[in-house]
Image (spheres, grey):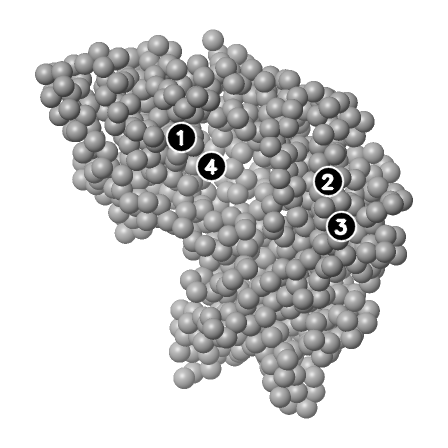
Amino acid sequence: MAKSDRRTFLKRSAAVVPAIVLGPEAAASLHARPQSEVPPAASTTLDAGLLGAVGAAVLPAAELGKSGVDQAVHGFQGWLDGYEPVAELNHGYFSAEIRYTPADPGPRWQAQLEALDAEARKRHEAGFTELGPADRRTLLARHIGREGANGLPGPARADHVAVGLLAWFYATSEANDLCYRARIRKQECRGLEGVGRPPESAP
Amino acid sequence: MRLRVVEADVCIIGAGISAAMVAEKVSERTESRIVVVEAGEKIFNLEDRFEHRARYLAYGENPWPDDHIRGQTAEGIQSRSMCVGGLALHWGGTVPRFTPEDFRLNSMYGVGDDWPFDYDELEPFYQEAEERIGVAGERGPAELDLRSEPYPMPAAPLSYNLLELKEWAEKSGIPFWANPVSKNTVPYRGRNVCQRCDTCNICPTGAKYSPDFTFRQLLADGRIELLTKTLVRRLELEADSDRIERAVAVDRERPGEPVEIRAREFVIASGYVWSAHLLLLSENSRFPDGLANRSGMVGRYLTGHRPASAFVEVPIKLYPGMYSSHSLLSKAFQRPGTLDRYVRHDLRIWTSTTGRSPRLRDDSGRLLLGDEVMADWRERTNTGAARLRAYYDVIPDRDSRLTLDSGLRNQWGDPMPKLTFVDAPESLDLREHTEASIHRVFDRIVQAGGGRVLRQGVQNVYDHPGGGCRMGNDPTTSVVDRFGRSHDHENLFVVGAPTVVSGGCANGTLTFSAMALRSAEVIGKAG
């Protein structure tokens, strides 16, 4: 899929939820948006095997299971596909400064995945995907260094791909619900009904 | 160069919430031809908001693309929004009223200045603003929450978290109730009910009021003409009088074709920065210090309130994310009665995630990976956290001021404003006492309800800024009269935030709107 096509696909996918709320007419207007309005997007597709191996090592695999880890890794790649470098960031109160998203982190992250694999081969005579979880984490810890000392950054500002994946995953509503074992569904448009009761439990 | 002349009865400069209030009301009460002139873009994008929201949530992107003008900024400006809807496109929609004390600070407490009218005089216009905007609220204790009629809509319901926090906080003896919001709890004026999306800076359903809805309707009904991307650069006088004859503007898309707007009355509704800025830019031989500025007060007495916050661990299991934008309010300290020493502030409580966010390193600095991250996060959520916040009013100094900065110009060569916020000496004297009092209130709540303060502090900002075209009865100490009419020019009004005498100790937008509606009582009646 060409990069502009992928970007368009992602933007149109994002319109599926609005279509439910706004109705078919408004949704049609979203789909009719001319191609010329779609800004260029980042284009890096990370090595799926290596990214999956990172995901299995750093995500809460015992609770997510393999399919949950795969889903998270897929979601992270989808996020990267839609990433737009130097897009204007939200500006609120107290600052007149206009800030922009950082450069595309994709190439750096892909290089890091390749470096993890190369180092695994040198240290263990096996590719990163073939290592057990403990060896993968040891290697990742060395690469992550001191990053994360002040909490998880925004995904695009993560220096290391593993931190980017963690930052993206832990910002999701799914991760929040998993932590609280409750269907909070943060930032979903949920209506006001039932808000006074504790959220349903999600064992 | 071809001059484009637009003729109207009432010319409103700016298209934020105060302009929306004036345009709507004047169009209902008079037959005036109304033209609204806005320097920025028209962003009527309800159909696109889910998409912008998705990008904002995923990437932090500006959900209001093109809501500002490159180069139209300056030191001290606290927001860049300049478009139809203004700052009230991405506002949070919190709409408390000020209390009677705010209008009588000098008479009651011997600090600051009294306003040229009192709460009772503004009260009907508060109600009118609440009805036009659409406010959902519940009345607090009658002695703290003065109002003559019910809110237009039932309050936004308290989440489970806020119900728990209300019980926790009220152990201190301080009453709390639902914060009033400009978000629909029932269908209202053709707009949707709040869906609890919790991204109020971009409300994807249109349940939160923003002025674009008003302008959209006024345009659909043919009740106004709206010029966008048209920057008014100066106002000019009639040849032999002090009346304003025309607004001289530039069409940002066709800068080679100057635009003039001629009208019987001019209303500057350009917020706390650009209102005074336009008057200063409009200097001439008869008004060498700027229009409406015989008093020398244009640009002075910039005001606002300062936020003090505490983040608190509470001995309650909470579920952040249920309805994070909603909060509890108390006006107990806005109406303190007799005081030995002046201190007034509002009080709000939100659910917080402080100390309860996922992290990569534990307290010892050890890297967490895999299941350890989730286990560490979960363990820290056994107790909840709350944010307590108090706005206290800063008494503005005469030199809290907007001036023209000849060293910084926009692309048309106009000097940009420079804003310097200064506390009055009496406010500086009170600062330590005020902040200590607020911290004692925070401690009182925590001691009564249980828990501990994790951190607290004061942001050194003026929130909800106003002033620069101060209202008053005395033409030597104020810019406009009690209706917003310039003391110096009978057909010139300034409305909303710039005209406040002081910033109060609660979010200001409802007060700005009520004042604009009060001004609209007399606008458009001439000729």
Q: Which residue is mark 2?
A: B436
Q: CA distance from mark 2 to mark 1?
A: 32 Å
Q: Which residue is mark 3?
A: B430
Residue displayed at 50% across by 15% down: B379
Q: Is residue B303 left or right of residue A85?
A: right
Q: Are marks 3 and 1 in contact (CB under 8 Å)?
A: no
Residue B469's place in the image compared with A45, above or below, is below
Q: Are marks 2 and 1 in contact (CB under 8 Å)?
A: no
Q: Nearer the viewer, residue A46 or B417?
A: B417
Residue displayed at 78% across by 75% down: B476
Numbered mark located on residue A22 in the image? 4
Which quadrant holds residue A198? top right
Chain name for mark 2: B
Q: Upstream in the sequence, badge 3 or badge 2? A: 3
Q: Which residue is mark 1?
A: A149
For label 2, the SS is helix
Residue type for callout 4: Leu
Residue type for callout 3: Leu
Chain name for mark 1: A
Q: Callout 1: few (<14), some (14-19), or many (20+) C-alpha neighbours within 10 Å?
A: some
The reply to the same-chain question for discs 4 and 1 is yes
Residue type for callout 1: Ala
